[in-house]
Every structure is written in structure tokens, then in C-alpha cells.
């Protein structure tokens, strides 16, 4: 029986909690919830059959065998560090918060024997990249295409005074490495971060961002080249019900990762 604590009771956290409550009886127990907005935690707790306690991050980590972070990139690095230092397994959704310190956190986990899980989230292709990395990988590129309004407020757009309303055909807004993309387009950071951490790191992973007035979905295209050959993985994401900023695939991927932790058969790389 895995004792699970969830930090962040929004779109992803709520779906995971519901899944544990409904489908993982006898395998997992939801023991604690935490959210900076108490009302979100209370609302989620009230919708569940189980009775998780609502508490702060430190107490949640203490009470859990597996900590699931679905809160924000501002706190995910700290949560990962604290959990693995205490020997607790941790699943991180806000992977952007790991980009600067992931090597240290992975080293801590080696020492404490804790496991770190980073779901694929809103992208596909990590399975191929993991295999490819066992030989030389020369190039990894992420191309993200969204409707222009999907980039509104991004620091890069504001700084360069780009008028998104004037874009009439597909326009490349940004090309650079994953670290630069993180600064300019923080809303895009999780996919770029997960891809970088899985593959060849944030400096060598290239990111291209395209505004497409005709786009109806957020599209992430991963391309990699190396000794294995070449791979292209394209994901056309629909928004999750209730939160247009989070792709439905990210929610599903988190649930599949949790099921994978408990399952005995591992399918795919
Ligand atoms: N890996 C991926 O591909 C991927 C995809 C989508 C979203 N995400 C990330 O996963 C996280 C959760 O996404 P979501 O759609 O559920 O977001 P959401 O906004 O629906 O919910 C986030 C919840 O976390 C809470 N929260 C925020 N900061 C917190 C903090 N410091 N401490 C405790 N609680 C805090 C909020 O109050 C909210 O209830 C986000 O950081 C998002 O960027 C990752």
C-alpha cells in the first residue's frame, strides 16, 4: 500500500486524487493534501471518499511514501529536494522548476534511494529519446505551435513589444535553447524542461516557438537525430476540461505514471 500526498489541488492534482480514490483501492491510500489556497484543498477533500488530512508541505512529506507535486515551478525544485532528502519518492509535474538543479536532486536521490518520477506530460517521444541516448544523440529540437493569443503576457513577447493581434500567418517568435525559452516563455517550460532532462540537457536542446493564427490546438513536435537514426513525435493537445492552460494529455500522463509505479508489467522503454 503506497501512502500518497498531493501538493497542488488544481486540475492535475484533483484528477490524480480522484483516480486514487476511485480506482486504486487496496494499492494506494491518499493520506494528505496541500495547497497554498486552503479552499482548493478543502474542495478537493470534500469530493473524495477517503479522508486525507490537509497540511503543509513538510508534514505532507513526512506522512507520505510518494509525494506528488502538481502546484507550480516556483516550488517544485524545493519539494523534490526535501522529499528525496527524506528518502521519499516524488513525482514532479512542474518540471520547469527542476531545470536549474536537477543534477543535484538526482544525486541526492542516488544517496537516499528515493525515486523521482517525471511524467511525459504534454509531449510524446521520450520513450524513443531514452533509447537513443544509449548511443550518440546529436540534436534535439522542440517546436511548439499555438494560436497567437496563447503567448499573450509571455516575458519575451512583452520585452520585444510583439503585437500578437497583427500576426496573420505562421510566425516564428523565438528560436534558442531550452534555458532561454524558460526565461522568455515560462508557460512553455514544462515540456522543454522534461525533454531537456530526459535528453541532452537544457543548453543543447533547441526550442522553436511558432504563433499560428489558424491553430486550434497546442502542438508540440519533438525531433531528435543521432546514431539511432531520426525520430519525430507530434502531439496535438486538446485543453483539459476546466483548465485551458493544461493539456488533457498532461493529466492522463500523470495518471498513467502513477499506475505504472504500482503495476508489475512495464510496457515501453
Ligand atoms: N509536465 C507537463 O507537461 C505539464 C503540463 C501541464 C501542467 N504542468 C504543470 O503542473 C502544475 C499543475 O498544473 P494544473 O493544471 O493542475 O494547475 P492548476 O492551476 O489547475 O492547479 C495548481 C494548484 O496548485 C496550487 N499551488 C500553486 N502554487 C502553490 C504552492 N506554492 N504551494 C502549494 N500549492 C500551490 C494552486 O493554488 C492550485 O490549486 C503547474 O505547475 C503546471 O505548469 C505540467
Image: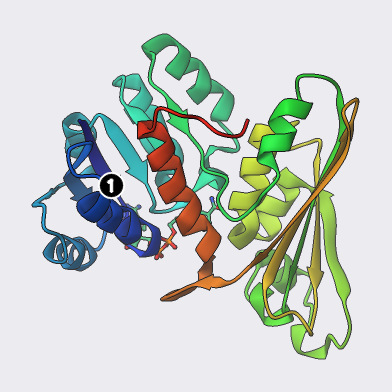
> Of 147 and 257, which appears nearest the observer?
257
- Pick the residue in front: 93 or 79: 93
Is residue 62 visible in this depiction of the protein? yes
Q: Residue at x 45, y 46 (%)?
A: 256
- Relative to 267, 207 lies left or right: right
SS under mark 1: strand
Residue in the image at 55% along x and 30% along y:
101
Q: Quadrant of ligand 1?
A: bottom left
* Image side of residue 252 versus residue 66, left or right: right
Q: Is residue 189 left or right of residue 47?
A: right
Q: Position of residue 77 (x, y in %)?
A: 45, 37
Residue 118 placement (x, y as % from top left): 51, 38
Q: Relative to 228, say whether 205 is above or below.
A: below
Task: Name which quarter of the figure residue 243 lies in.
Answer: bottom left
- In which quadrant of the rendered view does residue 163 lie? bottom right
| Residue 89 percent across, percent down from the top left | 35, 28
Count of residue discs: 1
- Rendered-image quadrant of the N terminus: top left
Horizontal and vertical percent for residue 226? 89, 30
Observer able to see residue 201: no
Judged from this view, the residue extending furthest toward the top is 111
Depth check: 1 or 3 in front?
Answer: 1
Decide: is 97 above or below 50: above
| Colouring mode (rainbow / by chain / secondary structure / one colour) | rainbow
**Mark 1 neighbour class, 10 Å CA radius: few under 14, some 14 to 19, many 20 or more:** many
Q: Please identify the residue farthest to the front as the structure is shown.
A: 265
Residue at 47% of width from left, 56% of height from top?
A: 252
Task: In the rendered view, tell whether residue 186 sits above or below residue 134.
Answer: below
Residue depicted at x 37% and y 24%: 84
Quadrant for the C terminus, please. top right
Quickly name the residue at label 1.
6
Q: Is residue 68 above or below residue 122?
A: above
Amino acid at each position: 500500500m503506497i501512502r500518497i500526498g498531493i501538493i497542488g489541488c488544481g486540475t492535475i492534482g484533483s484528477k490524480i486524487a480522484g483516480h486514487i480514490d476511485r480506482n486504486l483501492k487496496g494499492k494506494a491510500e491518499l493520506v494528505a493534501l496541500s495547497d497554498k489556497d486552503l479552499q482548493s484543498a478543502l474542495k478537493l477533500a470534500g469530493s473524495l471518499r477517503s479522508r486525507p488530512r490537509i497540511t503543509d508541505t513538510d508534514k505532507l512529506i513526512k506522512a507520505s511514501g510518494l509525494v506528488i507535486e502538481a502546484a507550480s515551478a516556483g516550488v517544485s525544485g524545493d519539494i523534490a529536494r526535501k522529499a528525496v532528502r527524506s528518502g521519499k519518492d516524488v513525482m514532479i509535474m512542474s518540471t520547469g522548476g527542476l531545470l536549474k538543479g536537477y543534477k543535484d536532486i538526482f544525486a541526492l536521490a542516488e544517496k537516499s534511494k528515493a525515486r523521482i518520477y517525471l511524467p511525459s506530460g504534454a509531449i510524446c517521444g521520450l520513450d524513443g529519446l531514452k533509447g537513443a541516448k544509449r548511443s550518440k544523440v546529436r540534436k534535439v529540437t522542440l517546436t511548439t505551435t499555438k494560436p497567437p493569443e496563447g503567448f499573450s503576457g509571455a516575458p519575451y513577447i512583452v520585452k520585444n513589444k510583439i503585437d500578437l493581434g497583427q500576426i496573420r500567418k505562421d510566425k516564428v517568435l523565438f528560436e534558442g535553447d531550452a534555458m532561454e525559452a524558460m526565461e522568455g516563455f515560462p508557460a512553455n517550460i514544462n515540456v522543454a524542461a522534461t525533454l531537456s532532462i530526459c535528453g541532452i540537457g537544457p543548453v543543447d536542446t533547441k526550442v522553436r516557438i511558432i504563433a499560428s493564427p489558424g491553430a486550434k490546438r497546442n502542438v508540440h513536435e519533438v525531433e531528435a537525430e543521432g546514431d539511432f537514426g531520426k525520430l519525430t513525435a507530434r502531439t496535438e493537445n486538446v485543453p483539459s476540461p476546466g483548465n485551458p492552460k493544461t493539456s488533457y494529455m498532461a493529466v492522463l500522463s500523470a495518471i498513467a505514471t502513477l499506475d505504472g509505479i504500482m503495476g508489475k508489467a512495464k510496457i515501453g522503454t
